[in-house]
Image: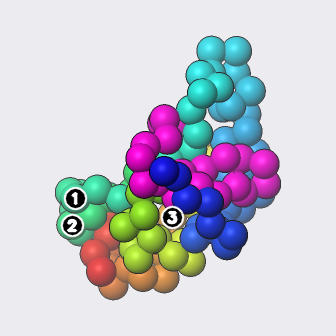
């Protein structure tokens, strides 16, 4: 049974929304997948962010950001509540970045954190 939550645990900048929608509009995109936001153990600081397209799993929480269907493992909310996802595109940096108010420290690459 999936749960839909009224408030979104994370936010996205206009750049992140634009890039995710661009990926979803690609002809080869599997429309049965949604954007998964989460965490996993590992990385320089102890935990790493998950951001990718995936199938909905039993017990996932569902939410939508600007028309983008999202899913998250329920237990990941304590690590991600209030996080902002951004898209950077420059000469020295290209990719998604994460600003997480729950992180006590982050690594230099910005994809790993500790609580």
Which numbered dot is residue 41?
1
Residue 94's spot in the image, x, y percent? Answer: 55, 45
**Which residue is situated farthest in the front direction here?**
1
Q: Which residues are magenta?
A: 53-71
Looking at the image, tell me whether mark 1 or mark 3 is earlier in sequence order: 1
Q: On the rendered image, what quadrant is the C terminus found in?
A: bottom left
Residue at image position (36%, 67%) is: 75
Q: Main secondary structure of the magenta part?
A: strand
Is 16 positioned to the left or the right of 115 in the image? right
Which numbered dot is residue 46?
2
Q: Which residue is mark 3?
A: 98
Disc 2/disc 1 C-alpha distance (Å): 6 Å
Looking at the image, tell me whether mark 2 or mark 1 is earlier in sequence order: 1
Is 107 positioned to the left or the right of 36 in the image? left
Q: Secondary structure at mark 3?
A: strand
Q: Secondary structure at mark 1?
A: strand
Query: Is 76 above or below relative to 102?
Result: above
Look at the numbered discs 2 and 1 and tell me whether their residues touch, using CB distance below 8 Å. Answer: yes
Q: Secondary structure at mark 2?
A: loop
Residue toward you, 69 or 15: 69
Mark 3: give few (<14), some (14-19) or many (20+) Cα within 10 Å.
some
Looking at the image, tell me whether mark 2 or mark 3 is earlier in sequence order: 2
Q: How many marks?
A: 3
Residue 66 drawn in magenta? yes
Residue at image position (65%, 26%) is: 31
Which numbered dot is residue 84?
none
Asked whether residue 110 appears in the rendered view, the answer is no
């Amino acid at each position: 049974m999936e749960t839909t939550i009224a408030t979104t645990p994370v936010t996205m900048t206009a750049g992140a929304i634009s890039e995710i929608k661009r990926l979803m509009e690609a002809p080869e995109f599997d429309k049965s997948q949604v954007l998964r936001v989460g965490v996993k153990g590992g990385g320089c600081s102890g935990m790493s962010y998950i951001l990718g397209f995936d199938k909905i799993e039993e017990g996932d929480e569902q939410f939508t950001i600007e028309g983008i269907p999202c899913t998250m493992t329920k237990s990941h909310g304590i690590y991600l509540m209030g996080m902002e996802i951004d898209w950077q595109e420059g000469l020295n940096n290209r990719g998604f970045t994460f600003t997480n108010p729950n992180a006590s420290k982050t690594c230099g690459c910005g994809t790993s954190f500790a609580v």
